[in-house]
Amino acid sequence: MDDQQHALAGLLRTMPIVTARGSEPGDDAPSGWLWAAVLVLALNPVRAAFAIPRAGRPPRDVVRLAALGGAIGGLAVCAAAAAGGPLLDALDVSEPSFRTAAGIVAAVAGAIDLFRRPPRPEPALAGWRAALVPVAIPVVARPALLVMALGAGADQGVLVSAGAMAAGVALLTGLVARSPAEGAGGRGQVWAARLLAAALVAGGVLLTLDGVLAV
């Protein structure tokens, strides 16, 4: 009887500890700053600037095309972030497990961008519809970025993704407005895109490790 009382007393004392830890959601989630950085790096505005259609368009129209398509693509990414939590719940997938998968995707995408040549403008829809294809999809809302958004939305909510997309699209628009696609400036932009790709690999490794340790 005494042994049972001691065991029961020990269990009762652990209940407040478990309750307190369970009442603080998101303690095991990575920093919102890390998610925001990975989202911007997955967009890689420097690299995306190469894929904006320029042929036959005045410079002002090209800038407006980048801004409009970036806004549409950013909204698609935010929609993915908003659906992240409910989608993982419906699939019965834990946030740390998906965080690990998202980190692997980020690392692989960064490695591919690191060694691949800058993209060329893909066939575009006529007129301003080019803001939808190819600028919004697939230049801005690329598959790797959508995967990152699902994980970021599940861990931190949609605000982190919205802030990251606002910064990324603003940077993309600014680069399109000032950066040349050829010459010394173009070569510098190529190396800057590769630097961001290497940073994406590092961010993906950090997310993967965080997810593994949190499981």
Image: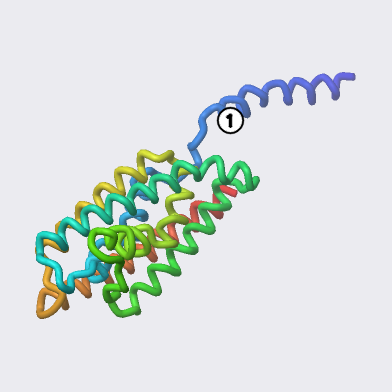
Q: What residue is shown at x 63% (from left), y 47% (from top)?
A: 91
Q: Is residue 9 above or below residue 166?
A: above
Q: Is residue 99 above or below residue 90?
A: below
| Image spot of residue 116 (x, y percent) | 34, 79
Is any atom of residue 20 visible in this view?
Answer: yes
**How many numbered circles does the render carry?**
1
Q: Is residue 209 above or below residue 194?
A: above
Q: Is residue 214 shown left or right of residue 118?
A: right
* Element under disc 1: helix
Q: Amino acid at mark 1?
A: Gly
Foreground residue among 107 and 183: 183
Considering every residue shown, the one lying at the far front of the view is: 126
Foreground residue among 195 and 141: 141
- Which residue bears the numbered disc 1? 22
| Image spot of residue 2 (x, y percent) | 86, 19
Q: Is residue 95 shown left or right of residue 145?
A: right
| Image spot of residue 42 (x, y percent) | 36, 60
